[in-house]
Every structure is written in structure tokens, then in C-alpha cells.
Image: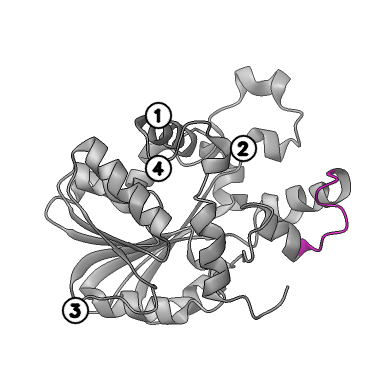
């Protein structure tokens, strides 16, 4: 893959391809759309709400100021807002801002949303208690300016939370390689091209991170913690899971998901 993928190319793709919208029949921005999206996201083989709450601490966020960089359709911030956090979302696409505003309006929640590049956050130093960016940085060629800005706007002792695609995942090393052999859409593609296609045929960039790379990216922070999830039995057993489903535990509670999951969650703190 070329090392010259620009934020303009990334913006153009996500402007017309909001996350998960391709697999949802309801019109984006409607109650039905958000219900379908939430059900997909909170499914056992994706990111159950209880797991997400453990990562973010939604239920203990009352009174905290929370920033989501790359807020998508506002899912994460809505969870914080329901528990009394003061939330702000930024995104480089107008589509995401419109969807986030629609979600909050429909739910009767309060939040602020701004259209801006994450490399230049329009907030004062030390504004937020929590700054998160979920599933965003692995679509950006040069994420360090965004990390620097997130650190700047965090209060001393504040928390940064990231979700990145994991280099050591079963999906990256096995599923994508199997697709390159068996799936006509993936044949002839490089591993990097197949990785890009995970988020849609026209996605210009997707990357995977090791724990060491994630730690180095957050070298200006301390107390790094890592969690993994999202490895379904269907992926792990390559489709031969139907007969075993009645006796299999929830996939995200398995040791496989916790060691070879697709999503790498990184939490760290800005030094005081």
C-alpha cells in the first residue's frame, strides 16, 4: 500500500460510507437505523455493552467532560451522556456530525458536535477528563498529531482510550488470508489491500497495531492497559461452528477472543 494516503481521501470515503450503514436497511439517521446499529455493535461476537462499559466507565462518568475524536454516529458519547457526562464529539465528516446530532435529538440527550480535523482540536489545554478515539487511528496515515492534540486537551491525570485493529489477531493472520484464497473479491489482493477491504471495497487505508506499537504511539502517557475482544466462533472455526453453538460459551468471553481478538483497546493516563 502507498504511504501517501491523505486525510482528504479518508474523509471522502467515510463521508459516503458511514460505519456499518451498508449492512443496515433502515435509512441513516432514523430511530430504526440506530436501533439496528446498536444491536450489531452490542452483539455477543462484536462489542457487548458490558464489555464497553468496562473499557469506558460509562456508568461512573457523571460530571466528567468527555471528548470523542472521530465520533461516528455518536454511539459512544450517547452511552456517556446517559450517565450524566458532559460530552463533545468531533469528526472530519459532515455525515458523522449529522448522524450524531440525530442520535442525540432522538434520544433527548445533550452533546456538542464539531466538524474538524483531529489534528487541530478547537479546545483549550486541559479541558477534558477523558479523550477517546474508537476505530479511527488505524485509518489515518500519520496519527501522531492527533495523539498530541488529544494529550494537550486532556487534564493532567486524564484518560485516553483507543481502539485499534490488532496485528496479532486471528482475523488478520488467518481469516483475511483465507479470503484471499477462497473469496473471488479478495483474490489477487495483497494482505494490505485485503485489510483495507475490511471496511468496504473503497476504503483507502486500514492498519494493524501490535501492543508495542500502540504503547510507543502513546509514549507521552503512563499506566498503559490493554484488552482484546471480537473473535466470533464462526471466524475461529472458519464457518464450521453450527453444530457446536449450543455448547459454546459467549465468544467474547473465550480465551481466544482475549488473546487473538480483532479489536485492541488501549487505555492510558496523561501524567499529572
Mark before the other along the chain sequence, 2 or 4: 4
Mark before the other along the chain sequence, 1 or 3: 1
Q: Residue at x 30, y 42 (%)?
A: 103
- Give the main secondary structure, helix, strand or loop, of the magenta stretch: loop
Task: Determine contact: label 4, label 3, CB under 8 Å.
Answer: no
Report helix, strand or loop for mark 1: helix
Mark before the other along the chain sequence, 4 or 3: 4
Q: Residue at x 76, y 28 (%)?
A: 240
Residue 97, position as x, y percentages in the image: 34, 56
Q: Is residue 152 magenta?
A: no
What residue is pinned by disc 3? Answer: 124
Sort mark 4 into few (<14), some (14-19) or many (20+) by Cα contacts within 10 Å.
some
> Which numbered tag is attached to residue 192?
none
Magenta range: 183-191
Marks 1, 4: nearer the viewer: 1
Marks 4, 3: nearer the viewer: 3
Report helix, strand or loop for mark 3: loop
Q: Residue at x 64, y 51 (%)?
A: 200
**Residue 119: quadrant of the picture:** bottom left
> Which numbered tag is attached to residue 51?
4
What residue is pinned by disc 1? Answer: 32
Amino acid at each position: 500500500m502507498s504511504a501517501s494516503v491523505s486525510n482528504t481521501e479518508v474523509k471522502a470515503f467515510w463521508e459516503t460510507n458511514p460505519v456499518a450503514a451498508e449492512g443496515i436497511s433502515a435509512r441513516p439517521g432514523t430511530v430504526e437505523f440506530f436501533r439496528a446499529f446498536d444491536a450489531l455493535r452490542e452483539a455477543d461476537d462484536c462489542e457487548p455493552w458490558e464489555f464497553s462499559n468496562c473499557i469506558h466507565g460509562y456508568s461512573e462518568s457523571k460530571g466528567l467532560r468527555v471528548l470523542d475524536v472521530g465520533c461516528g454516529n455518536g454511539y459512544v458519547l450517547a452511552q456517556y451522556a446517559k450517565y450524566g457526562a458532559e460530552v463533545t464529539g468531533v469528526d472530519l465528516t459532515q455525515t458523522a456530525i449529522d448522524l450524531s446530532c440525530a442520535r442525540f435529538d432522538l434520544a433527548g440527550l445533550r452533546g456538542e458536535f464539531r466538524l474538524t480535523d483531529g489534528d487541530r482540536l478547537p479546545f483549550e489545554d486541559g479541558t477534558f477528563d477523558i479523550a477517546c478515539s474508537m476505530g479511527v487511528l488505524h485509518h489515518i496515515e500519520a496519527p501522531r498529531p492527533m495523539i498530541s492534540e488529544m494529550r494537550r486537551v486532556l487534564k493532567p491525570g486524564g484518560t485516553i482510550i483507543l481502539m485499534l485493529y490488532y496485528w496479532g489477531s486471528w482475523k488478520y493472520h488467518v481469516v483475511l488470508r483465507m479470503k484471499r484464497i477462497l473469496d473471488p473479491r479478495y483474490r489477487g489482493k495483497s494482505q494490505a489491500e485485503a485489510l483495507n477491504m475490511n471496511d468496504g471495497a473503497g476504503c483507502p487505508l486500514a492498519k494493524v497495531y501490535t501492543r508495542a506499537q500502540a504503547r510507543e504511539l502513546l509514549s507521552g502517557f503512563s499506566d498503559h492497559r490493554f484488552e482484546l475482544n471480537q473473535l466470533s466462533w464462526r471466524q475461529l472455526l472458519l464457518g464450521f461452528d453450527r453444530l457446536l453453538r449450543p455448547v459454546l460459551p459467549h465468544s467474547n468471553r473465550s480465551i481466544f477472543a482475549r488473546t487473538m481478538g480483532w479489536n485492541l483497546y488501549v487505555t492510558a493516563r496523561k501524567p499529572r
